[in-house]
Amino acid sequence: MDIKEIGKKIKEYDYKKLLNTKAFLIVGCITLIGIAILVSTLVNSKPQETANNESTKILGNTVLVDNNVSGEEETVNEENGVDDFFVMTVMNRQSVRDEALEVLQQIADNPEALPDAKEKALADIAAIAHNITIEGNIETLIKSKGFENCVAIISGDKCSIIVKSKGLLPGELAQILDIVYQQSNILPENVTVIEK
C-alpha cells in the first residue's frame, strides 16, 4: 500500500457510522463526565480570597465587636466552614449530575443515535433520577435521627454518607447503615460513613 491509497481510504471512510456507534457514545459521555468532575474539583479547590487575606475570615460573616469571650469567633468560623463544606458538596454533586443528565438527554434526543444508545441513555437518566430520590430520603432520615447535617452520594452499588458529627457512636453508625440499606438495598459493607 502506498501513501495515495491510504489517503484515499481515509477520505472515503464513512465517519458518520463511527459517530453513531454505541462504544463511541459511551466513551464520549464518560469523557465529558470526567472532564466535568475534573473542572469542578479544580474550581472548588482554589482558596477563597478575602478583603484582607486572613484565612479565618469569610466574606459576608458578621463578627461581634468588643466581645470578651475568647475563642467564640474561631468556633463560629469553624462551624461555618463545616456548613460551607456540606453546601459545596451538595452543589458539586448537583452540578456533575446536571452535566451528565444534559449529555444523556442529548443522546436520547438525537435522531441519528442508535436505538441501543438511546435506550441506555434513557435508562441512565432514570437511574440518576432514582438515586436523587433515594439520596434525599437517606439525608432526611439521618437528619431525623439528630444529626445536624448529612450528604448522601450513591454511585452504582456503593454509597458514601458524610455526617456532621464529633464522634459517631456504634449505635449511630448502625442507624445510618440501616437507613441506607432500607432505602437503597445497598449492603453495609458497600457504605462508607465519613465524619466531618
Image (spheres, rainbow, N blue to C red):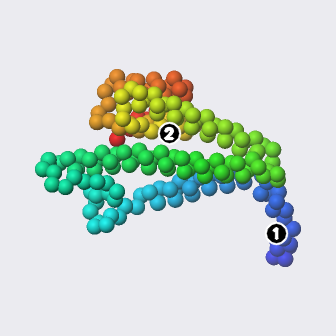
The amino acid on which the numbered mark 1 sits, given as a three-letter code, is: Ile
Comparing labels 2 and 1, the label whose residue is closer to the camera: 2
Using the rendered image of the protein, determine whether residue 187 is visible from the camera's viewpoint: no
164 or 117: nearer the eye? Answer: 164
The residue depicted at 66 percent of the width and 51 percent of the height is 102
**Image x and y of residue 142, in percent:** 42, 29
**Image x and y of residue 70, in percent:** 14, 49
**Image x and y of residue 114, in percent:** 81, 48
Query: Vertically, is 91 above or below 12?
Result: above
Using the rendered image of the protein, determine whether residue 159 is visible from the camera's viewpoint: yes
**Badge 2 or badge 1: first in the primary sequence:** 1
Please give the count of numbered marks on the rendered protein: 2
80 or 97: nearer the eye? Answer: 80
Query: Vertically, is 5 above or below 185?
Result: below
The residue depicted at 79 percent of the width and 57 percent of the height is 18
- Left/right placement of residue 55 relative to residue 13 reads left
**Circle 1 sits on which residue?**
10
Badge 2: how crowded within 10 Å, few (<14), some, or many (20+)? many
Q: Quadrant of the C terminus?
A: top left
The amino acid on which the numbered mark 2 sits, given as a three-letter code, is: Ile
The residue depicted at 67 percent of the width and 52 percent of the height is 103
The kind of secondary structure element at disc 1 is: helix
Task: Give the number of the disc on residue 153.
Answer: 2
**Image x and y of residue 108, in percent:** 75, 47
Q: Quadrant of the N terminus?
A: bottom right
Q: Give the Cα distance between marks 2 and 1.
A: 45 Å
115 or 165: nearer the eye? Answer: 165
Dividing the picture into quarters, in which one does residue 17 lie? bottom right
The residue depicted at 55 percent of the width and 32 percent of the height is 134
